[in-house]
């Protein structure tokens, strides 16, 4: 039995929350918002079999555990917080239960509606990044195999409308917070915010370099944290993973401090010329499977941030100029 949690906003709207196993090692949360007249489903899981089954079981459990009368036919819209597979991958499966319009921020539309094209372009950019990071061809092949895991299961799904900051949707406010993902949005329902993957209760959300995907990167992310910190009177945060956030303002402070500490570590590591692969190894130590890729992206996001601000430079300029596919080495100024 899937456990569904119920939260009530200051104005009496209800938010139901339940988990799905998006990937073997990753739990994501589905949210259902209702005000007695309208019902909105937020995110759809990954599209993998377990995730799909739990998406359905959790929705049905709302009726059983809380005597709600809502059905799939009552869903007025599906709101996607951002264009990562663990949040939108179940959309094609979901179409077997509801034809409700799907909304996402415009910067993530192409990921969902032109998925096959986006997967091809993103894969090529990642290969280039890994090559410049200092991985061998065999290592790159292994990382790309991990990256593409399950990505062939999804198919493009049309988007019907955009989630726009400054344009409320049935009383739900959207805040565009790029960084973790180009089209990442937070949803404010009265005094409760669905923070998606922008703010999590104990993990510092993953960052990847903007050189791989525009409107990602640590600079965008830190600016987006500052944006949410300026919104008053948010009583509770509910992330796309992990537990509820009782103090989002304090959590923002903690996340920013963690990144500042990591930036200082990268500067220390780069007292001598280092590749991204070397920076990653020193920062995170021995990693396995998908966590190796995450570590390489995280290290690159921090090195990129420092490079953009003139605190790191490319130390092997002559090699970069003379080599068609250079490995870049970074050094502290």
Image: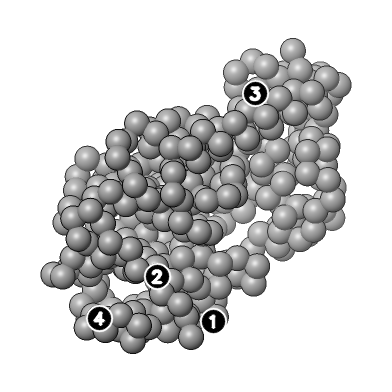
The location of residue 120, given as percent across then percent down, is 56, 56
**Dot placed on the residue nearer the N-terminal end, 1 or 4:** 1
In the image, taking residue 11 as reference, residue 118 lies left or right, namely right
Badge 4 density bin: few <14, some 14–19, many ≥20, Cα 10 Å:
few
* Residue drawn at 37 percent across, 59 percent down: 80
Residue 306 is labelled as 3
The reply to whether dot 2 and dot 1 touch (C-beta < 8 Å) is no
State the separation of the CA atoms marked 1 and 4: 26 Å
| Pointer 2 residue | 5
Q: Which of marks 3 and 2 is in front?
A: 2
The location of residue 246, given as percent across then percent down, is 44, 49
**Dot placed on the residue nearer the N-terminal end, 1 or 3:** 1
**Dot placed on the residue nearer the N-terminal end, 2 or 4:** 2
| Pointer 1 residue | 49
Q: Nearer the viewer, mark 3 or mark 4?
A: 4
Position of residue 314 relative to residue 23, above or below, is above
């Amino acid at each position: 039995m899937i456990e569904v949690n119920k939260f009530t906003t200051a104005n009496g709207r209800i938010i139901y929350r339940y988990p799905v196993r998006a990937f073997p090692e990753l739990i994501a949360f589905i949210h259902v918002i209702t005000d007695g007249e309208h019902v909105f489903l937020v995110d759809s899981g990954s599209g993998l079999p377990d995730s799909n089954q739990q998406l359905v079981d959790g929705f049905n459990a709302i009726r059983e555990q809380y005597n709600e009368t809502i059905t799939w036919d009552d869903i007025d819209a599906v709101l996607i917080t951002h264009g990562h597979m663990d949040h939108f991958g179940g959309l094609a499966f979901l179409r077997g239960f509801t034809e409700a319009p799907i909304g996402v921020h415009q910067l993530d539309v192409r990921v969902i509606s032109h998925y096959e094209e986006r997967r091809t372009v993103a894969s090529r950019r990642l290969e280039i990044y890994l090559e410049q990071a200092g991985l061998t061809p065999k290592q790159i092949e292994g990382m790309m195999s991990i990256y593409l895991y399950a990505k062939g299961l999804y198919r493009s799904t049309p988007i019907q409308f955009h989630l726009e900051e400054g344009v409320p949707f049935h009383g739900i406010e959207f805040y565009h917070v790029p960084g973790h993902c180009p089209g990442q949005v937070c949803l404010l329902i009265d005094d409760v915010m669905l923070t998606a993957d922008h703010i999590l209760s104990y993990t510092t959300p993953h960052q990847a370099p903007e050189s791989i995907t525009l409107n990602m990167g640590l600079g965008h992310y830190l600016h987006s944290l500052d944006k949410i910190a300026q919104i008053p009177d948010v009583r509770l945060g509910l992330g796309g993973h992990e537990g509820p956030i009782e103090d989002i303002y304090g959590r923002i402070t903690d996340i920013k401090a963690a990144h500042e500490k990591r930036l200082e570590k990268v500067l220390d590591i780069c007292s001598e010329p280092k590749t991204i692969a070397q920076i990653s190894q020193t920062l995170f130590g021995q990693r396995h499977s998908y966590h190796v890729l995450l570590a390489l992206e995280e290290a690159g996001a921090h090195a990129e941030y420092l490079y953009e601000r003139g605190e790191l430079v490319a130390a092997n300029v002559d090699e970069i100029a003379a080599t068609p596919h250079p490995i870049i080495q970074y050094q502290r100024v």
